[in-house]
Image (cartoon, grey):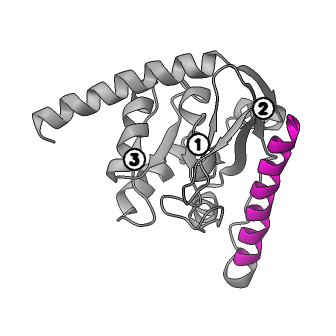
Amino acid sequence: MPFLDKIRWNMVGILGKIILFLWAKSTRMKILGEESYQKLREQGKPVIFLVWHGRIFIVPYFFRRRKIMPLVSPSEDGEIPAQIMSRWGYRIVRGSSSHVIRKAWNVMIKELQRGGEVIIVPDGPRGPNREMKLGGLKLAQETGAYLVPFTFSTSRKKFLRSWDSFLLFYPFSRVVAVYGQPIAIESDLKGDALETERQRIEKLLVQLDEKADKYHS
């Protein structure tokens, strides 16, 4: 990366972290459904968080300083969250379904095999919105990791006119962060059975968004 670009991206990361921290700190946050996830971690079980692209705004702040490994797109759009998250102790791995992912895949497998945590955006980086790809399920099959859906919503919503209907929260809002129930994937599922499971989990993720959206309604 050219020197001037490094300076520019460093400024993006530093300022982005400060702004997001102050923005999120101004809210009143409620956390729901964390108990089952905490039990997994107490037992040393590996976890793959599933977060829709449109619900990732809170992720860098919420999971900060936990040394989680997020899969971030290698595109320029992915550089912004990568710069911010790297300053909060995340162990960034770059890759996506629209780019060569074998190296990133192997890194995530090693992380999960040692009992770590990974964050995947199952409809990213280009959608369609809330249509889940198979990558997370296959990663869980290879490693024995549990899939844990995660989302958030807010009392004062702002949905952007983007492909993912990106959700922002206003400063001083009430925010709810919601964990779904952990999901174990059978290692021998394939073909139509695996597709049926993909559809089931996709529906659960959508329902989790609906639960979060209704919390402050």
Q: Is 132 located above or below residue 170 in the figure?
A: below
Badge 2 amino acid: Ser
Image marks 2 and 1: residues in contact by CB distance under 8 Å: no
Residue 118, position as x, y percentages in the image: 55, 44
Residue at 51% across, 24% down: 20
The rendered magenta stretch, by its main secondary structure, is classed as: helix
Dot 2 or dot 1: first in sequence order is 1
Characterize the local packing of mark 3: few (<14), some (14-19) or many (20 or more) Cα atoms within 10 angstroms.
Answer: some
Give the distance between the C-alpha atoms of the residues marked 3 and 2, in whole angstroms: 27 Å
For mark 1, what is the residue?
Answer: 56
Magenta residues, start to end = 194-217
**Comparing labels 2 and 1, the label whose residue is closer to the camera:** 2
Viewer-nearest residue: 11 or 82: 11
Residue visible at 73% across and 29% down in the picture: 42
Instruction: Give the label on residue 155, or none.
Output: 2
Instruction: Name the quadrant of the C terminus.
Output: top right
Pointer 3 with pointer 1, Cβ within 8 A: no
